[in-house]
């Protein structure tokens, strides 16, 4: 046993003067794991939709699988935490999870649909073992009541977001040069680094592996349980947004708050938490559009020279930029006795979430109402989907022709036109296509084929003529106008992410901490599990993205904004009874 471990064991009854080395080990372990996790998430829906390397799925099909995967991801910590607490211990559970993660990302690098489903199974199991237990180990490094524990979770949460910010940027580069499958292999390598770090420096986290300190239980302080559970779902710990009622409000406030809470009937406290769960469901349904519809918007409708993959970095970057200024602001208000109550912050956070989608609604409206110039048509990208098909029929294109376009499939079962993105290829991409043809024994591209591949417009018309001979020439102008993908400034997306990140930092951090403070002790574990279930339901409801190809983008964003703002209004209307049910928070 190292000297550091001996020091931690001796300090268990007291406090630590500085953070143990184990925090750096767990920081790196989590950072590389989140790098691999968000690498996959940044690529996943675009990979499913890709007609060449992927499977040519529609947005609705890709969104359904994405939402189902997220639901199981957010449920899995309940099972993984239980197994670690009762049987394996925490470090062993994290190692097991790491190996499942490696297997999952490696399996995704296999170009087959069976590999996708098998990989998702591995990733859900890996998440269940890894996430709740590495979060619990952070708290277990410190004795109960340590003044460093809050800061440790804040540092750990920054590790989550460093990995989340780097992953899409690296994936954008790897995918551009080597394709999706190589990018998934890089994600697997991130997990190799994560597991190797935890194994090589295991002596620094030995103290954190004690099985008698569970993720949520009566033997540990409620804030550790809340913070370890929060970081297990990538939510900010309670200290990130200065949501705790301790600090400048006085050392005796914990006891005073407990006395106030004890005076409230259990039924009222439970009803208040049910309201919180309803908020969580709506929030995650709206917020986690980032891996599906916001990625589609970034890929199809944002005027930059990268794909939608990279947009998945924006939220994490804003968290790194905004977190500590927001904490300082809450501290400033707290010192003057003006810091809003937790329910008020939740209402403000939900309002900001809704306003972020108002920003997106406006940006999409600008693009939808713009006039497509001949230059835009000549250099643009195109996609025919259900919405476009309906418009074409309304404009006089025969329905049987449109039906042929939507139903056309290649010999491998991929859609030929429905949901396929037609974009001009670069010279490098055409050279890569010729290289692939040579490796497969196929002839090089002809001059006419190269000319067509350099234009999304020509590719689309050629595809229509192949499916319905002559119809691309006969109805080309209408098809190109209807299928053209407008482009707006990246400002709208980046600004919307800034607003929703502020909403996240006001609403999400206190959720689990609130459960730990408000729930009756006899039902704390059940209600903490309720938080995970509500989070999972919210993530499954991201499936509302199946309407992305049916509604206008502006309509879709407006519907989500309305849902969030409606919940915000409800919260403001019931603030008084909520405060009475949750005194002191």
Image (cartoon, rainbow, N blue to C red):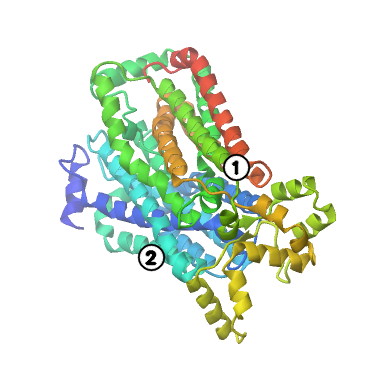
In which quadrant is the C terminus drawn?
top left
Foreground residue among 7 and 186: 186
- Tell me where residue 515 sits by quadrant: top left
**Residue 157, relative to residue 381: is it above or below?**
above
C-alpha gap between disc 1 and disc 2: 45 Å
Question: Residue 193, image x and y in percent?
Answer: 35, 63
**Would you say residue 519 is visible in this rendering?**
no
Q: In this rendering, is residue 289 above or below 502?
A: below
The residue under the point 81% across, 58% down is 401
Q: Kindly give the residue lying farthest to the bottom in the view shown.
A: 441
The answer, for residue 249, to whether it is visible in the render is yes
547 relative to 432 in the view: left or right: right
Q: Residue furthest front?
A: 374
Q: Measured from the top left, where is residue 541 in percent x and y?
A: 60, 40
Task: Indicate which disc residue 192 carries.
Answer: 2
- Near mark 1 (Cα within 10 A), the count class, few <14, some 14-19 or many ≥20, is some
């Amino acid at each position: 046993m190292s000297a550091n471990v001996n020091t931690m064991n001796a300090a268990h009854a007291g406090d630590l003067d500085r953070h143990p080395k184990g925090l750096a080990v767990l920081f790196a372990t989590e950072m590389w794991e989140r790098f691999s996790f968000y690498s996959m998430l940044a690529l996943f829906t675009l990979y499913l939709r890709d007609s060449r390397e992927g499977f040519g799925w529609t947005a609705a099909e890709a969104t359904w699988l994405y939402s189902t995967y997220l639901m199981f991801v957010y449920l899995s910590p309940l099972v993984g935490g239980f197994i670690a607490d009762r049987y394996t211990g925490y470090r062993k559970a994290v190692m097991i999870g790491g190996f499942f993660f490696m297997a999952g990302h490696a399996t995704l690098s296999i170009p087959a649909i069976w590999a996708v489903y098998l990989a998702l199974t591995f990733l859900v199991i890996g998440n269940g073992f890894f996430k709740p237990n590495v979060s619990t180990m952070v708290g277990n490094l410190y004795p109960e009541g340590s003044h460093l524990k809050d800061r440790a979770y804040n540092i750990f949460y920054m590790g989550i977001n460093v990995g989340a910010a780097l992953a899409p940027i690296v994936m954008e580069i790897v995918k551009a040069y080597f394709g999706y499958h190589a990018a998934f292999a890089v994600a697997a390598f991130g997990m190799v680094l994560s597991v190797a770090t935890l194994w090589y420096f295991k002596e620094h986290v030995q103290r954190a592996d004690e099985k008698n300190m569970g993720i949520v239980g009566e033997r540990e302080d409620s804030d550790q349980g809340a913070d370890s559970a929060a970081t297990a779902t990538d939510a900010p710990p309670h200290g990130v947004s200065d949501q705790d009622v301790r600090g400048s409000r006085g050392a005796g406030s914990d006891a005073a708050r407990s006395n106030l809470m004890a005076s409230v009937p259990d039924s009222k406290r439970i009803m208040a938490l049910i309201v919180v769960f309803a908020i969580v469901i709506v929030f995650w349904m709206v917020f986690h559009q980032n891996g599906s519809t916001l990625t589609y918007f970034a890929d199809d409708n944002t005027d930059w020279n990268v794909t939608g993959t990279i947009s998945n970095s924006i939220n994490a970057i804003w968290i790194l930029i905004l977190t500590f200024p927001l904490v300082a602001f809450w501290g400033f208000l707290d010192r003057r006795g003006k810091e809003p109550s937790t329910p008020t912050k939740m209402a403000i956070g939900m309002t900001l979430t809704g306003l972020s989608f108002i920003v997106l609604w406006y940006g999409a409206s600008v693009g939808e109402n713009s006039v497509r110039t001949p230059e835009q048509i000549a250099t643009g990208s195109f996609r025919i989907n259900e919405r476009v098909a309906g418009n074409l029929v309304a404009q006089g294109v025969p329905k049987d022709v449109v039906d042929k376009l939507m139903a056309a499939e290649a010999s491998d079962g991929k859609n030929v036109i429905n949901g396929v993105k037609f974009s001009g290829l670069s010279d490098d991409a055409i050279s890569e296509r010729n290289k692939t043809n040579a490796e497969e024994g196929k002839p090089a591209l002809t001059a006419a084929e190269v000319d067509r591949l350099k234009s999304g417009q020509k590719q689309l018309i050629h595809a229509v003529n192949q499916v319905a001979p002559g119809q691309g020439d006969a109805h080309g102008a209408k098809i190109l106008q209807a299928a053209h993908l407008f482009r707006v400034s990246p400002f709208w997306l980046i600004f919307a992410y800034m607003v929703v990140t502020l909403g996240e930092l006001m609403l999400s951090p206190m959720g689990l901490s609130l459960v730990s403070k408000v729930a009756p002790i006899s039902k704390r574990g059940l209600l903490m599990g309720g938080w995970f279930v509500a989070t999972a339901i919210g993530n499954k409801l991201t499936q509302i993205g199946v309407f992305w190809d049916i509604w206008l983008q502006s309509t879709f964003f407006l519907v989500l904004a309305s849902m969030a703002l409606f919940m915000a209004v409800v919260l403001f209307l019931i603030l008084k009874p909520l405060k009475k049910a949750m005194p002191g928070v």
